[in-house]
Image (cartoon, rainbow, N blue to C red):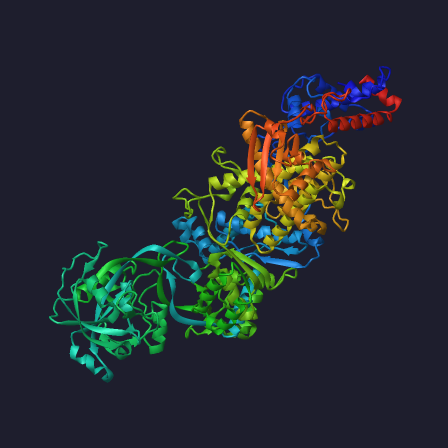
């Protein structure tokens, strides 16, 4: 083996040289042996022992000469897989030797430049990701990158998640989307300011505390004790959630996070409230609000969720008309047997009825009722349709209903409705009817456009104390505001015989039964419809008039609508949703009857109950809270809470007990965070939350900002949909379809069923979905993401491993690069530009698609596949290898950075394994990937001529067809690997044929057509009549898009197989010294021997003696 590596002029007397040569060969052989045996308990091979002995050498120069390396070497080609058709000669030879084959085999293996890297194919994410995160933390990478960047500030304001439990997949999606954006902006040289926050007040946390206590503990719970426990729970949850967010790889200013319970935050919130109050936007009034009996508090629209499956007891009832104005004399002929027919899904509100509303533009019919076809049922609790007793006692009964609904009602009721007269709705105004329960007279009024003929009777039972539209109509007519229901949803004394009954339960049934007994019910039936539920308790709510504090949206609605149109909404249709919700919003109920929250800073006169709240009192309370927190409101006396000028009257006042809506808390974050911290900007560049926040945080932030600053708190808003399981179902514990982000990252107890996929795989999934709609995730989706991640990691590993000996000085100028390399750089530049555009437009799923197609498919299957020949056997310092490495370096540095926002752990892991330093244009050495900034590729890369782009597109098409032909030949046993084949091509297009012919004998090996097809030879035929065709066993034809035909023939390659590169060549056997080599490999081996001899000639006598002794 030794003699093969050196010229014949070296004689046996050169013992020093031969000793060193043997030592070097032993080291080179044993290095592969050691890699393959690294997991064995015993290293018995003599070569391994030799290696260990060599490593103990005291001679630094001999150690250097032996070319010791700490890189692992590939024993196979897993890093860049391709089809079975491909030859893997040098790699497979090395693999055989590493697995213990005889040393006589593959004697040229040590002349092959195999890839070397310590970057593993397996991510080992449960260990490696935390290691990388610790490196970032220890080196304060986020902070140092921000401080070094000078391209302007970028502020993505964090919408505070609720601090009341473990994180779910929606949290992960949201935070990872934000992190992708922030990391991209870092690479774009922005000073990214991202302050994470948490929403810490409100009922959910209060309920968590109460649920943790037994009955005795609850009885002893004072407001302050409850608040202390709630604060402790919230802070503990924040720490837990923060740790999870960090594990996702999210970068943020974690040490400077904001909590809505921080005193400085609460003070800023009080300031916003005060500014709105001073401008007259805050008022106290009694009006119907969404009320949760289960939570005993008012709710904002954003605190509701609508149950599509809710079933109400709907009734058709009649109210007897008793008087008509002079303008409606034509109705008198039907009295006293004329009734109004109404329909309602809330029978329990009938006791609060104050009017019946009609649409003044609708036609109404007076119909005679007859021919009852069914008898009434006696049970009202069976949940089925039941007809009432309203026909009993009246020989002649007439009803008023909408004309368009006569036939519908006739069919539904099973009655004959005979038309007697029609009138306009406006003709019915001011008619009077008798209330069906307490016999008081009530008017018919004209309502709004909410009265239609889509359902019901066209006449609407109106209870201003129990409905927003009813309330508005009641204001117009001065109707009484009756609401005989308490905080628990139970009828009060005001409801008479119904007092003490639950309005959503037995109280509802009692009202129905009463109407039936008094001949006022036509029919009751179950009605399934969308109904508002308390989002926390998951129980139905009611509309109920109470004394509350409101923000008058009407006062600044127009300004808000104008501001909405100045904001960039993603997706663009989101503007329609926020516009509709804002334009139709009623006044905002901002008071809550709970203990855990920021107090509404108001005092009430003990006797008159008049509120005391002005600029002085609010400022004083704000200053106290800024120092002591909102707990001060509960433990300080009224005298201390009032400003100096009011203290002598303190005994006349008492503190209010209401707290602010939590949406007012979070909706003030722009004031408490953006407007108070010097490093941040107001308005923020971006808000990003779920689509449900159009009626939540987006809107509350908009309203408070518009009311006090006159502008929106954000320049742009991104909304995302909800995460569903793989079947498109909502996740729930009862269905067992919950995908826990922690389990995705760390794996479950049974890691075969629930393997650890890594934070990067989770992030890759986030980038793969179109977040503007609902997204699916589950085991199958995660397996697909994991497979894509593994292939991407393999590609990066290949790039790293083939740059193990790279130096920047080796870079080949662009103009000197082979055309295949120039084309590869052109493709890379286009990919980088396309991905940058997708990042800028926040379309991350397009980035995922481009990366998957280019890096994993196009790059690996073509360029890297073809490159292996010149990388492994072209010669270490050959032009073609250095030109290829020039391209590989550009790809490695570019791909690593363009994936870094999405896959930061993978990108950083790759960066820490770079076999060279990366220096930015300003001379800064980037120790971490995010210090390197976005790749700015040479403009020359995009100057690749258009005709060349088209030509290489044809080459790629042709290569696909050639591969098919080779596969057919392989299936027919003509060839094994593709290197055993010779291709014949005939092209009908003369110019294309001429170009292909030139590529058969190019100026460099890289552009050679047989290298591109990975065959041993390619010949271009001028005619299909060529005699050589008779030896071709497998043929085919390919029709190109332009209509040109290319004939493809496959035969066995000429010549013998080269023992080094496994290409077939007639030159094999023609070299006396190396009869098993082709011409190229002979040249490479001779040059290596000459280089080794030159190195050995520089070794001193003492160094040589030491080597011999060892």
* 110 relative to 659 in the view: left or right: right
User: Which quarter of the rendered picture does the N terminus lie within?
Assistant: top right
* 353 relative to 688 in the view: left or right: left
User: Does residue 984 lie above or below 340 as drawn?
Assistant: above
* 340 relative to 107 in the view: left or right: left
Q: Position of residue 30 (x, y in %)?
A: 71, 22
Closer to the camera, 195 or 163?
195
Closer to the camera, 1024 or 690?
1024
Q: Residue furthest front?
A: 1025
* 327 relative to 756 in the view: left or right: left
Q: Position of residue 741 (x, y in %)?
A: 51, 44
User: Which quarter of the rendered picture does the C terminus lie within?
Assistant: top right
Q: Position of residue 255 (x, y in %)?
A: 62, 52
Where residue 583 sits, quadrant-wise, is: bottom left
Tell me if residue 1099 can be seen: yes
Q: Residue at x 53, y 45 (%)?
A: 765
User: Does residue 238 lie above or below 863 as drawn?
Assistant: below
**How many marks can you see?**
0
Where residue 101 sits, quadrant-wise, is: top right
Where residue 468 sits, quadrant-wise, is: bottom left
Tell me if residue 590 can be seen: no
Q: Position of residue 693 (x, y in %)?
A: 48, 59
Q: Residue furthest right?
A: 1101
User: Does residue 558 lie above or below 687 as drawn?
Assistant: below
Q: Residue furthest top?
A: 12
């Amino acid at each position: 083996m030794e003699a093969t590596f050196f010229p014949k002029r070296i004689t046996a007397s050169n013992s020093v040289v031969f000793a060193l040569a043997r030592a070097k060969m032993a080291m080179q052989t044993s290095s592969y042996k050691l890699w393959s045996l690294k997991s064995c308990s015993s290293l018995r091979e003599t070569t391994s022992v030799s290696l260990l002995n060599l490593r103990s050498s005291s001679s630094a120069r001999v150690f250097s000469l032996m070319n010791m390396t700490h890189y692992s070497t590939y024993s196979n080609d897993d890093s860049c897989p391709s089809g079975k058709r491909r030859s893997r000669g040098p790699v497979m030879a090395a693999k055989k030797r590493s697995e213990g084959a005889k040393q006589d085999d593959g004697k040229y293996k040590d002349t092959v430049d195999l890839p070397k890297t310590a970057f593993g194919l397996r991510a080992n994410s449960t260990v490696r990701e935390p290691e990388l995160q610790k490196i970032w933390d220890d080196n304060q990478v986020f902070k140092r990158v921000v401080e070094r960047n000078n391209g302007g500030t970028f502020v993505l304001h964090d919408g505070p998640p609720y601090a009341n439990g473990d994180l779910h997949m929606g949290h992960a999606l949201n935070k990872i989307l934000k992190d992708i954006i922030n990391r991209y902006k870092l690479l774009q040289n922005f000073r990214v300011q991202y302050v994470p926050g948490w929403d810490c007040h409100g009922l959910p946390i209060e309920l968590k505390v109460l649920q943790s206590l037994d009955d005795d503990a609850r009885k002893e719970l004072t407001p302050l004790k409850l608040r202390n426990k709630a604060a402790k729970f919230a802070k503990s949850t924040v720490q837990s959630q923060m740790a999870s967010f960090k594990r996702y790889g999210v970068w943020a200013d974690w040490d400077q996070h904001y909590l809505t319970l921080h005193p400085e935050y609460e003070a800023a919130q009080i300031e916003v409230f005060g500014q709105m109050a001073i401008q007259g936007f805050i008022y106290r009034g009694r009006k119907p609000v969404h009320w949760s009996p289960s939570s005993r508090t008012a709710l904002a629209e954003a605190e509701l969720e609508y149950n599509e499956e809710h079933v109400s007891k709907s009734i058709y009832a009649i109210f007897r008309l008793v008087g008509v104005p002079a303008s409606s004399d034509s109705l008198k002929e039907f009295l006293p047997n004329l009734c109004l027919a109404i329909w309602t899904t809330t029978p329990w509100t009938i006791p609060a009825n104050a009017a019946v509303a009609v649409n003044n533009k609708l036609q109404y019919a007076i119909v005679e009722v007859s021919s009852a076809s069914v008898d009434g049922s006696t049970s009202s609790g069976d949940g089925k349709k039941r007809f009432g007793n309203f026909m009993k006692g009246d020989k002649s009964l007439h009803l008023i209903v909408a004309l368009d609904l006569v036939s519908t009602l006739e069919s539904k009721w099973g009655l004959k409705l005979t038309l007697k007269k029609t009138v306009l709705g406006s003709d019915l105004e001011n008619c009077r009817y008798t209330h069906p329960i307490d016999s008081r007279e009530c008017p018919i009024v004209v309502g709004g456009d909410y009265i239609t003929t889509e359902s019901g009777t066209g006449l609407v039972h109106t209870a201003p104390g129990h409905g927003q539209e009813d309330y508005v109509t009641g204001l117009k007519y001065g109707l009484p505001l009756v609401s005989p229901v308490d905080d628990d949803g139970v009828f009060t004394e005001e409801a008479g015989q119904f007092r003490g009954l639950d309005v959503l339960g037995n109280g509802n049934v009692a009202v129905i039964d009463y109407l039936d007994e008094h001949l006022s019910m036509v029919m009751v039936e179950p009605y399934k419809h969308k109904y508002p539920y308390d989002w926390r308790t998951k129980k139905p709510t009611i509309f109920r008039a109470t004394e509350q504090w409101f923000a008058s949206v009407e006062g600044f609605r127009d300004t808000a609508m104008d501001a909405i149109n100045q904001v960039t909404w993603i997706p663009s249709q989101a503007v329609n949703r926020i516009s509709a919700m804002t334009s139709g919003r009623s006044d905002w109920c901002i008071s809550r009857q709970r203990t855990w929250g920021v107090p509404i800073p108001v005092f009430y006169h003990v006797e008159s109950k008049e509120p005391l709240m002005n600029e002085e009192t609010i400022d004083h309370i704000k200053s106290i809270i800024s120092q002591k927190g909102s707990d001060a409101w509960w433990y300080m006396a009224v005298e201390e809470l009032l400003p100096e000028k009011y203290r002598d009257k303190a005994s006349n006042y008492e503190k209010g007990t209401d707290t602010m809506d939590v949406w007012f808390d979070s909706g003030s974050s722009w004031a408490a965070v953006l407007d108070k911290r010097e490093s941040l900007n107001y308005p923020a560049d971006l808000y990003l939350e779920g689509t449900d926040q159009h009626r939540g945080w987006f809107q509350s932030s908009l309203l408070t900002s518009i009311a006090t600053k006159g502008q929106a708190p954000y320049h742009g808003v991104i909304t995302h949909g909800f995460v569903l399981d793989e079947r498109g179902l909502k996740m729930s514990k009862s269905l067992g379809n919950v995908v826990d982000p922690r389990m995705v990252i760390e794996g479950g107890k049974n890691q075969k069923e629930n393997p650890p996929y890594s934070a990067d795989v989770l992030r890759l999934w986030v980038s793969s979905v179109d977040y503007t709609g609902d997204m699916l995730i589950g085991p199958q989706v995660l397996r697909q993401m994991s497979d894509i991640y593994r292939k991407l990691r393999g590609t990066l590993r290949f790039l790293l491993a083939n740059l193990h000996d790279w130096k920047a000085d080796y870079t080949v100028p662009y103009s000197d690069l082979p055309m295949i390399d120039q084309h590869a750089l052109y493709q890379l530049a286009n990919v980088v530009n396309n991905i940058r555009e997708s990042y800028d437009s926040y379309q991350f799923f397009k980035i995922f698609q481009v990366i998957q197609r280019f890096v994993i498919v196009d790059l690996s299957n073509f360029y890297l596949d073809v490159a292996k020949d010149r990388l492994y056997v072209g010669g270490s310092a050959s032009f073609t290898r250095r030109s290829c490495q020039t391209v590989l370096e550009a790809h490695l540095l570019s791909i690593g950075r363009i994936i870094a926002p999405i896959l930061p752990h993978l990108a950083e892991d790759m960066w820490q394994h770079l076999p060279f330093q990366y220096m930015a244009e300003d001379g800064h050495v980037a120790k971490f990937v995010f210090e390197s900034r976005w790749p700015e590729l040479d403009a020359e890369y995009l100057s690749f001529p258009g005709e060349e782009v088209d030509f290489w597109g044809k080459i790629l098409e042709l290569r696909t067809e050639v591969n098919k032909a080779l596969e057919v030949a392989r299936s027919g046993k003509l060839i094994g690997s593709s290197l055993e084949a010779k291709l014949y091509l005939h092209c009908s297009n003369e110019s294309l044929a001429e170009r292909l012919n030139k590529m058969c004998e190019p100026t460099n090996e890289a552009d050679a057509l047989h290298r591109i097809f990975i065959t041993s030879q390619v010949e271009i035929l001028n005619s299909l009549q060529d005699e050589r065709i008779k030896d071709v066993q497998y043929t085919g034809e390919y029709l190109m898009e332009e209509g040109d035909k290319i004939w493809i023939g496959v035969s066995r390659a000429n010549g013998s197989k080269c023992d080094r590169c496994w290409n077939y060549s007639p030159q094999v056997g023609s070299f006396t010294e190396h009869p098993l080599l082709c011409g190229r490999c002979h040249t490479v081996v001779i040059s290596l021997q000459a280089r080794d001899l030159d190195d050995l000639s520089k070794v001193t006598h003492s160094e040589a003696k030491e080597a011999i002794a060892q």
